Amino acid sequence: MPNSFGKIFTISTWGESHGPAVGVVIDGCPPNLPLAAEEIQAELDRRRPGQSEIVTPRHEEDRVEILSGVFEGHTTGTPISLLVRNADQRPEAYAEMREKFRPSHADYTYQAKFGLRDHRGGGRSSARETIGRVAAGAIAKKILALGGGVEVRAFLTQMHDIAVPTEALAGFPTLADVEATPVRCPHAATAAAMIERIKAVRSAGDSVGGVIECRVRGVPAGLGEPVFDRLEADLAKAMLSLPATKGFEIGSGFAGTRLKGSEHNDAFEARDGAVRTATNRSGGVQGGISNGEELVFRVAFKPTATILQPQKTVDVHGAETELAARGRHDPCVLPRAVPIVEAMTALVLLDHWLRHAAQNRVFKF
């Protein structure tokens, strides 16, 4: 079903923005993994609203409750159910949206598909649904780190027309570098400019978008299931399933179209007893399968659709009208989207690693 993701390590998220709670059910988690609610909470704290002056002021502690699948501090191999209760709900702020469609939001399309919709904060289309993804991703990240030494790091490289200088992106940023500023951009000067831009558009009742880059090191060669479940194809699906995403590119991406084959090819070389590539324009994936190099991709996020300026729209009866949205919204979704991108990356990689092991490591002929 469309609310589930993964083949072996599967998740099913549930809940709406202004319902009683949101959460996720995880199936296929290996047993005997040490797991405490505090480990999941650490990732949810990075995603939660109200954590700085540049994000939505909605006050939610987003405290996770483990309902099943963990006994005496270890996973049991049975479904893990995680719940986060919604506390700071103000559905009255969305009363006007019961009748009016917000431009570039999911209001009209949900109405067209289902014949009804939850207008309170977007209901199921709200980014609050991603709480379940981040909670499940925290478990996936722990398995990848303990079992394979995999490290996932996402960060902002561009906001509106402000971008990190290319030469500043050479190294693998530390978590401390990313978390040093509320925008989660590891380049201090660029981060400062991004913060000022967010404050400016917020005061004008507007919004901005941008680009998040994700890098993963420690990924072994061999992950990916051609032809339809190529690693980059599943990563693209995972990223484009996130609210507000509009683009995905891996490695050289669209810039690679401006190169010749002789300029773009990653030459193989023997290094430290392994087959490696001299460059990484492929972004760590060739033929839909990881090649052992650092995984590098980027995700484009549009400006937040809900803005506090009058906009032309139509109502549920088809009459033209005007809407000035109220409510508490991020003027830029990117700072809080960083842990969501990391979570979805970890979910894809863990699922592919388990699939690879099932096909190639169980039976030996």
Image (tube, rainbow, N blue to C red):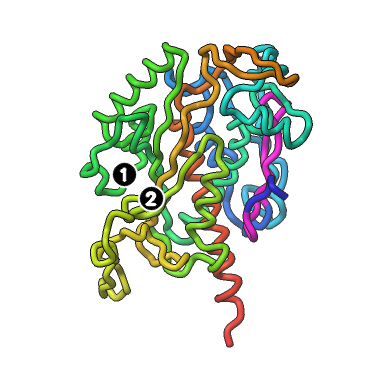
306 over 358 or under it: above or below: above
Badge number at residue 215: 2
What is the x, y in percent for residue 307? 52, 18
Q: Which residues are magenta?
A: 6-26
48 over 80 or under it: above or below: above
For residue 235, side relative to residue 153 (left or right): right
Which quarter of the rendered picture does the C terminus lie within?
Answer: bottom right
Q: Mark 1: which secondary structure?
A: loop
Badge number at residue 101: none
Examine the structure image and report whether residue 17 is included in the region drawn in magenta: yes
For residue 8, side relative to residue 268 (left or right): right
Q: Mark 2: which secondary structure?
A: strand
Q: Residue furthest left?
A: 167
Q: Nearer the viewer, residue 253 or 16?
A: 253
| Residue at image location 58% in from the left, 32% down from the top | 127
Q: Are marks 1 and 2 in contact (CB under 8 Å)?
A: yes
Q: Residue furthest front?
A: 319
Q: Nearer the viewer, residue 259 or 229?
A: 259
Q: Residue tagged by mark 1?
A: 173
Identify the amino acid type marked 1.
Pro
| Residue at image location 31% in from the left, 59% down from the top | 281
